[in-house]
Amino acid sequence: MLIKSAVDIPPSEITDPDLFARRRHFIQGAAASALASGFGLPALAAAAPQRGEKFPDIRKSQWTVDEKLTPYESVTTYNNFYEFGPDKDDPAKHAHRLKSRPWTITVEGEVKRPQTFAIEDVLKWAPLEERIYRFRCVEGWSMVVPWIGFSFSEIARRVEITGNAKYVEFVSLADAEQMPYVRVPLLDWPYVEGLRIDEAMHPLTLLAAGLYGEVMPKQNGAPLRLIVPWKYGFKSAKSIVKIRFVRDMPRSSWMKSAPQEYGFYSNVNPEVPHPRWSQAQERRLGEFLKRKTLPFNGYAEQVAALYAGMDLRRNY
Ligand code: MTE
């Protein structure tokens, strides 16, 4: 995400993939090493994460695309997780401070059985599946990741949502002791995102506990995060501590920070430019040439019906 004036970050700190690549190039100096590491491909040795624990018994899923995977190293070193800093390599450098155990998730609001669950129990709700999804950031980069998780809809069965539940709000941890940038007003903390209830209940909407067969790296949102593959990446809240079923449309942190730029829906749409840049193309992490962005990030067949009759230019 490119943060605007409300935020105390100079333009030099804005980190789109090209700028990141140029900065990396400058740091690395020699053209040879720039070539070796690939244009825009993140590979800071200092930020290299430890490989995590493996999940046993992961099922394959029908909700999967047959596309070349983005390398683990790129997925885990080129991140947005502003609680750990605004630069792409900040999360991999600082997220080791996150304590992902013990961890609880509170589910409340328009439900008959509000509850606080231990993460260990949440992970037993449904068989864990591997789902290879396209993921498109609003900044113009994208990736293909084998996430591990289960459909968010499993949650509704546990807490019995009422007929008043029209939206779902996802709240991330905001603990300045673990997350140094929570002391800085980059965003309105805690990080909050929202979905309409039918979007949340769509089987593609994933609660992800891992990637590449392993527990979620902290910089990617351990221990549990959302993945909504037909929406821009910022909808996919990380390190979730609260899930609230609500009557009214939630105001996400990004809507509060720049309402003209980040709407509630944020469906990937090549025809609706961001006010400051086009959304027609994207660059896969690690690739040189850009590719065309697809409506709903290529998931139109599965999700377009959710928006039948809506003007998606107005509802951006
Ligand atoms: N969740 C929290 N709590 N904080 C964040 O800063 N960034 C969002 C989203 N979820 C963010 C977050 C944005 S802008 C993107 S593009 C994705 O996480 C990035 O996910 P990734 O780092 O796993 O690629």
Image (cartoon, rainbow, N blue to C red):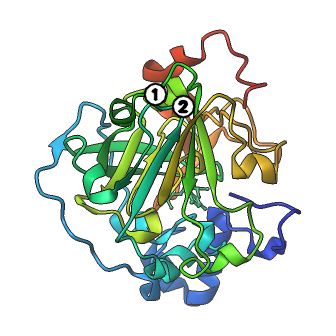
Amino acid type of the residue that numbered disc 2 sits on in the rendered structure? Glu
Q: Which residue is mark 1?
A: 161
Say which element carries label 1: loop
Residue occupying image coordinates x 59% and y 43%: 232
Which residue is more in the foreground, 207 or 250?
Answer: 250
Residue occupying image coordinates x 80% and y 54%: 257
Which residue is more in the foreground, 83 or 24?
Answer: 83
Up the image or down, 124 lies above or below 250; here it is below
Amino acid type of the residue that numbered disc 1 sits on in the rendered structure? Ile
Residue 304: x %, y % from top left: 53, 19
Q: Tell me whether circle 1 and circle 2 mark residues in contact (CB < 8 Å).
A: yes
Up the image or down, 87 lies above or below 155; here it is below
Kindly indicate the quadrant of the structure image that contains residue 4.
bottom right
Q: What separation in Å lies between label 1 and label 2 (alpha carbons)?
A: 6 Å
Q: Residues within 10 Å of mark 1 (few under 14, many from 20)?
A: many
Q: Which residue is mark 2?
A: 110
